[in-house]
Image (cartoon, rainbow, N blue to C red):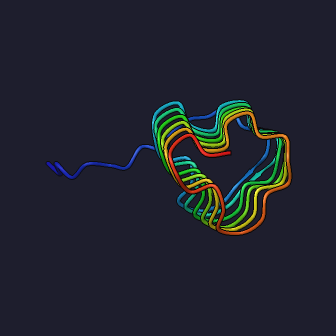
Amino acid sequence: MDHAMALVPVLTTSKGTIGSNACNSSNACQDNTDTIGAASCDGIGSCNNNQGSISKDSCRSSNSCDRNRNKIGLGSCLGINSCEDNEGVIGNGSCNSSNACGGNKNNLGDNVCNSINAC
């Protein structure tokens, strides 16, 4: 008898495009309607109700990027609860701390807002 464990894919209610190795945690990417890049949204409960474009290697902590409505750049929103309710464009390498950029309505550049509760 083979006792090897089979990998079970995480089930989502996504209607959008999900890249490889993305959304690999419980309750991630539920009700997604846009694009989630490779290796993104792998925190528990991350990227739920996403309606914006999330780039590669972004939103990788618990509850990050929920209810996103715009573009999130490469390697951004890596802190717990970061970028929730985002409505603005977030550049690359930005909002990488806990609670950063929550409720953002502005367009943010690259490598900004990287401290707790920033922006």
Tell me if I can see residue 33 in this picture: yes
Question: Which residue is drawn at the image coordinates 33% and 49% (left, top)?
Answer: 6
Q: Residue at x 53, y 30 (%)?
A: 27
Count of marks placed on residues: 0
Residue 13 seen by the camera = no
Left or right: 2 in relation to 40: left
Left/right placement of residue 3 relative to residue 104 reads left
Q: What residue is at 61 percent from the left and 45 percent from the top?
A: 118
Position of residue 47 relative to residue 5, above or below, is above
Please provide percent x and percent y for residue 105.
84, 40
Q: Is residue 7 above or below residue 75?
A: above
User: What x and y, as percent, mark residue 47?
Assistant: 64, 39
94 and 11: which one is in front?
94
Horizontal and vertical percent for residue 79?
50, 48
What residue appears at the point 68 percent right and 45 percent down from the top-left corner?
A: 119
- Left or right: 89 in relation to 66: right
Name the residue nearer the viewer: 118 or 10. 118
Image coordinates for residue 73, horizontal then vertical, percent? 72, 63
Q: Nearer the viewer, residue 44 or 71?
A: 71
Q: Is residue 66 above or below residue 90?
A: above
